[in-house]
Amino acid sequence: MAKSTVLQDRVKIRGIRRRWLLNSIGAVALMLALVVGAFAAALWSYYYTSTFNDLAGKAASTASGFRTYTSGPYLEAARQAVNNYEEKSFLELQFLDTSGAVLVSGNGLTTGSTPDTQDIREALELQMTRSWHGRDPATGERIACSSSPVVYQGQLVGVIRYVTSLTAIDKQFAFSLVIVMVIALIVFSMVYFSNLYFVRSIVEPLAGITEIAHLIADGSYGVQIEKRYDDEIGELTDTINNMSLKIKQSEKAQSEFISSVSHELRTPLTAIVGWGETLQSGKLRDAGDVRKGLDIIVSEARRLTNMVEELLEFSRIEDGRFTLSVEPLDLKAELEDAVYTYREFFHQEGIELTYHDCEEEALPISGDPERLRQVFCNLLDNAAKHGGSGKRIDVSIRPDHEDAVITIRDYGPGIPEAELPFIKKKFYKGSSKARGSGIGLAVCEEIVTRHEGTLDIGNAEGGGCQVVIRLPMEN
């Protein structure tokens, strides 16, 4: 299944390469075609249009010089003009009569012929200089010609016609066009191969990244992609590598969390089942022992209940079902209830819980009393669990400008500096050997944040850990 998915992704990547090349190369090919077309039009104008215009100009100019002659001297002047014509090697000069027959020509072979081309017919009919190009009716050679009528005293006496072969011009035009097309092909090839290299430099790393992403999706957490570039592909590689490591860390944390929770649940369950079976057997006759067993069962059951509630709260936070029932309350009174609840319990453990009151009678806030009490109880329980060796816990509350500040400090060993940045992350337990799921502080952080407050944990001067809660007070 994984191989099939990778194969599909490779096909998709080839599709990306195809689309990229079609789009970029198609645009370049279209642009080059337009350039070649424009250049061909310019070459046509340079070689052909200028030739046609030159022929027409020569025909009109020569015809203008013969208009002072009558039909008799016109023929003699025509012969003289042909004999004195210097460009006959590449440009033929012809004199035609009004019927279209060639009277005199620089090329004796055409004398007496009747070319009957469009330029001659139009010059005779319209009495205007006309040009034409195409196949010579007699030889089949491509020619260009211009004919201009000779009009004397309002009467048409003949036609002067210039004829030139287009063979040399066609060859020059074709050669120039081939040169342009070769240059265009070279440019196209350079663009194509540069684009191919550029696309390959993107697509091939993407193919590698895709394969690694599938490995990660299949459970190979922590696998890393070799970084070859320092551009956007490199940034994507760093992001996926970082994601892979974080997934691995998260997976490890969750595995440790499951193992820890399983152990935490097993311990009180073992105590409850053991004492329950002992009491059920009826072997205990002493009332003190029976009461001690019942106390252990109740204590462990309460601990189990607290753990389950903690897990449920974390589950609500994770799936977005965590809500607050906000109402006006006295933060000072809520904290005092939690302190009084734990004071006797701590006393039995040999821990002195000291509460430092403030002068204000009440510190009003808007909050959820159940959730805040959960925070206070969790933090007090943590103080006893991790700092109970100091045999003392101080709790204080005071106003600070627009905030109410609660401080809970123990006198235990404190928290290693390297672990402080991670202490509030879910599933994190650090080096502490104390029992716990590793999600209590994450839940507390979420509750305090939902109240628009802050929860800071650090080491106190003189030893021990100190937790500071700041919550905004009502005006």
Image: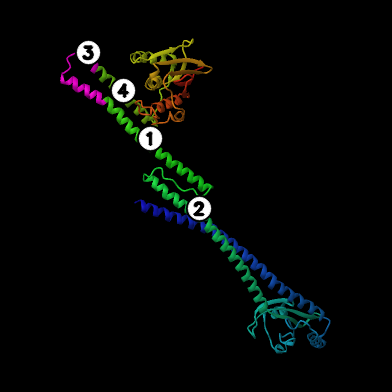
Q: Main secondary structure of the magenta part?
A: helix
**Is 121 on the left or on the right of 23, as rendered?**
right
Earlier residue among tags 4 and 1: 1
Q: Does the magenta stretch include residue 199?
A: no
Location of mark 2 (residue)? 202
Mark with earlier residue (1, 2):
2
> Which stretch is magenta?
269-293
Q: Which of marks 4 and 1 is in front?
A: 1
- Quarter location, residue 296: top left
CA separation in Å, label 1 and label 2: 35 Å
Q: Distance between the residues labelled 4 and 1?
A: 23 Å
Is disc 2 surrounded by few (<14), some (14 to 19) or many (20+) residues within 10 Å? some
Q: Which residue is drawn at 72% across and 72% down?
A: 50
Badge 3 or badge 4: first in the primary sequence: 3
Task: Identify the residue shown where x is 47% and y is 10%.
Answer: 361
- Residue 166 image label: none
Q: Is mark 4 on a helix, strand or loop?
A: helix
The 10 Å Cα crowd at callout 1, few under 14, some 14 to 19, many 20 or more, is some
Using the numbered discs, state the Cα–Cα distance from disc 4 to disc 2 in whole angstroms.
Answer: 57 Å
**Mark positioned earlier in the residue sequence (1 or 3):** 1
**Residue on which disc 4 sits:** 303
Question: Which of marks 2 and 3 precedes in the sequence?
Answer: 2
**What's under tag 2, amino acid-wise?**
Ile
- Graded by Cα atoms within 10 Å as few (under 14), some (14 to 19) or many (20 or more), the crowding at tag 3 reads few
Disc marking residue 288 = 3
Label placed on residue 253:
1
- The amino acid pointed to by label 1 is Ala
